[in-house]
Image (cartoon, rainbow, N blue to C red):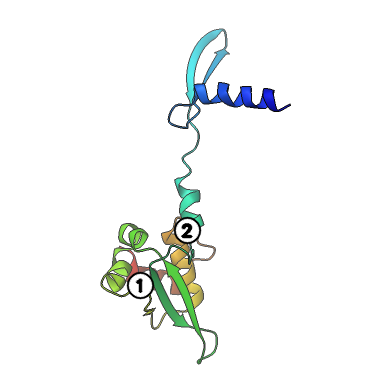
Amino acid sequence: DCAKLWESAIKLNEVLNNDTLTMELRMTVDGTKSRVNFMPKNPFGKCMLKLFLDEECADVIFELKGDDASSKINYHAHRCVLKACAPDLFRLCEDCDVSTPITIPDVESRVFLELLRYVYGGEVSEISADWMNDAKKFID
């Protein structure tokens, strides 16, 4: 029923603080009462991974060789993420135009993709010697 739903929404809005619901958990362990405030896990890591390769708000394009000599692969990134997490990679694009791809020579596209995933907080699926050598070029 709409009236009950609206009433519930109003009650919920009264307990929100800056659009955040804070919960208090009271537990008794071995007869001892304790008070524990619940703090949800910080969503920053998941949010960063959502930005990984997001073309819509990216302001950097990296261009790498594709599988055959004539093909090119573009990867999109964000300068602010690169500045914080891969300063040497950021320096490559610091003064470049947003629409001009930055060529990354001598790095396999799959290795560069894993490197970017790592920069955005993701797990590296395979740490090879190539990955380690290329990572050292771009990440402090």
Question: Where residue 53 sits in the image (x, y, percent)?
Answer: 49, 65
User: What kind of residue is marked 1?
Assistant: Val
Which residue shows up at 49% across the image and 13% down it?
Answer: 34
Q: Which residue is mark 1?
A: 98
Residue at disc 2, secondary structure: helix
Which residue shows up at 48% across the image and 73% down it?
Answer: 111
Residue at disc 1, secondary structure: loop
Q: Quadrant of the N terminus?
A: top right
Question: Alpha-carbon neighbours of circle 1 within 10 Å: few (<14), some, or many (≥20)?
Answer: some
Which residue shows up at 66% across the image and 27% down it?
Answer: 5
Q: Which residue is mark 2?
A: 51
Residue toward you, 29 or 115: 115
User: What kind of residue is marked 2?
Assistant: Leu
Which residue shows up at 43% across the image and 62% down it?
Answer: 57
Question: Where residue 124 sits in the image (x, y, percent)?
Answer: 50, 61
Question: Where residue 49 sits in the image (x, y, percent)?
Answer: 49, 56
Q: Residue furthest front?
A: 3
Q: Residue furthest top?
A: 31
Question: Alpha-carbon neighbours of circle 2 within 10 Å: few (<14), some, or many (≥20)?
Answer: some
Marks 2 and 1, how far apart at CA = 17 Å
- The mark tally for this picture is 2
Question: Where residue 30 sits in the image (x, y, percent)?
Answer: 57, 11
**Can the viewer see residue 116?**
yes
Residue 63 found in image quarter: bottom left
Query: Is residue 131 shown above or below 19?
Result: below
